[in-house]
Amino acid sequence: MATIKQFEDLDIWKEAIEVAAKVYKLTNTDSIKNDWSMKDQIRRSAISISSNIAEGFEYNNNKQFVRFLGYSKGSAGELRSQLYLLKKVNSINQGDFNDLSESIIALSKKLMSFIKYLKS
């Protein structure tokens, strides 16, 4: 594996930014934008994924990086849980739910693979 010099070069970080962008667009829809609490919480979960990847990378220490990747994976789970609630109360449609959920699951799997790689 090539040496990565900055977190912006990590595919998992790029994908996490894409997930957060999707969440921001979703939370600007009429059904969510005035639910300030949910809007804030779901955005924070989404932002936390990429932020923890960046923060962990900047420690320049694999043990710390693995810990922060775990936080990112946890935030991905939190975000998926919030999507289920939005779907349950009909704030998002099935298509938006599927699209975002699939993106988050794929990212979560990549985070786990990267964690395993760094631990080996």
Image: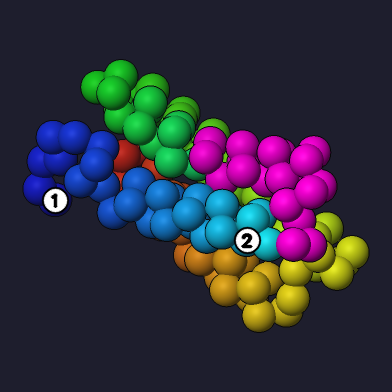
Q: Which residues fall within the magenta stretch? A: 30-48
Residue count near mark 1 (Cα–Cα under 10 Å), binned few <14, some 14–19, many ≥20: few
Magenta run includes residue 25: no
The answer to whether residue 36 is magenta is yes
Answer with left or right where residue 17 lies relative to residue 26.
left
Mark 2 vs mark 1, foreground winner is: 2
Mark 2 residue type: Leu
Name the quadrant containing residue 30: bottom right
- The residue identified by callout 2 is 26
Q: What percent of the width, then of the height, locates residue 68?
A: 46, 30
The alpha-carbon separation of the residues under discs 2 and 1 comes to 35 Å
Look at the picture and state if 45 lies above or below 79: above
> Is 31 left, or right, of 112 in this rendering?
right
Residue 1: give its label.
Answer: 1
Residue 39 appears at what percent x and percent y? Answer: 71, 45
- Mark 1: secondary structure: loop
Q: Residue 5 appears at what percent x and percent y?
A: 13, 35
The circle on residue 22 is: none
| Residue shown at 26% from the left, 47% from the top | 10
Decide whether the magenta segment is chiefly helix, strand or loop.
Answer: helix
Q: Residue 65's spot in the image, x, y percent?
A: 36, 29
Category of crowding for the residue at label 2, using alpha-carbon neighbours closer than 10 angstroms: few (below 14), some (14–19), many (at least 20): many
